[in-house]
Image (spheres, helix red, strand yellow):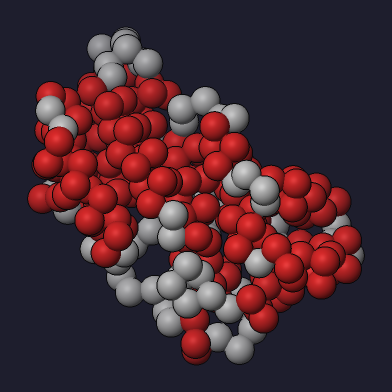
Amino acid sequence: MRGATLVLVLAVSTAAVAATELLSGIDSAQSLSSFQQSYYREPRPELVPDAIRFVGASDLLEQEGAPRVTAAFFAELFARHRGRVAEWSAVMHAQPEPARVMLRRAVASAGAPRALIDAEPPSPARNDMCWAAFFASGDSWYVDHLIEQLDYDAERSDLRLFVTGSSAKWSLASNAGVHPVVEQRLEAARDVASGTRRTALDQVLTASPGQIRAEAIEIVRKGRESGKW
């Protein structure tokens, strides 16, 4: 199930995210996670330079898919604070190359952050990008896009597509209890859905994230045992 959980520090949980008002700076993965996951509800633009410095100094961007996920977050953040990007440019330019390249992409994408998602093929990494962008913006477009990925949960020929669907299902279930807008979009989608998407939405809204993940792992195990995957 590699890729079925959010990369970087964006791993979702039904546990309450630490309130950003308690942060005086960003000096750990935990504080960065709190800053990111709460940003659309509790924006703290004064902490953006700290976030940039921490990303640049850490090994977070060495993880698979992490540069794209982080770029999606900062692209939406920069779109939200277009007037302050120039103010933060000196901090961005001072970062080592991996972070500087990622931030340059985020700045270039700030005019149309959704294009970053559209440029990616269906994958768990694209799901992660949606969550990163949603946490920065609160834009329900990203939640709706994740709901569309639920159709892949019924895939049994292509492992990558199945994991795309199952990771969307697990992460939507995890975030529904933390972000009311996610639950609202799920309920609205279920009202008009049918077939396999309706089945997946029913599961998202009634089963625990642990149950969903365990079921997906079992499907992958059986697929590998049969030689299909």
Q: Nearer the viewer, residue 135 or 171?
A: 135
- Quadrant location of the N terminus? top left
Residue 171: percent from the left, percent from the top?
33, 49
- Which image quarter: residue 84? bottom right
Q: Nearer the viewer, residue 6 or 90?
A: 90
For residue 7, side relative to residue 18 (left or right) = right
For residue 38, side relative to residue 174 (left or right) = right
Q: Does 24 sit above or below residue 227?
A: below
For residue 36, side relative to residue 11 (left or right) = right
- Quadrant location of the C terminus? top left
Q: Nearer the viewer, residue 198 or 55?
A: 198
- Which image quarter: residue 55? bottom right
For residue 133, side relative to residue 85 (left or right) = left
Residue at position x 27%, y 16% in the image: 156
Residue at position x 50%, y 37% in the image: 126
Residue 193: percent from the left, percent from the top?
16, 33
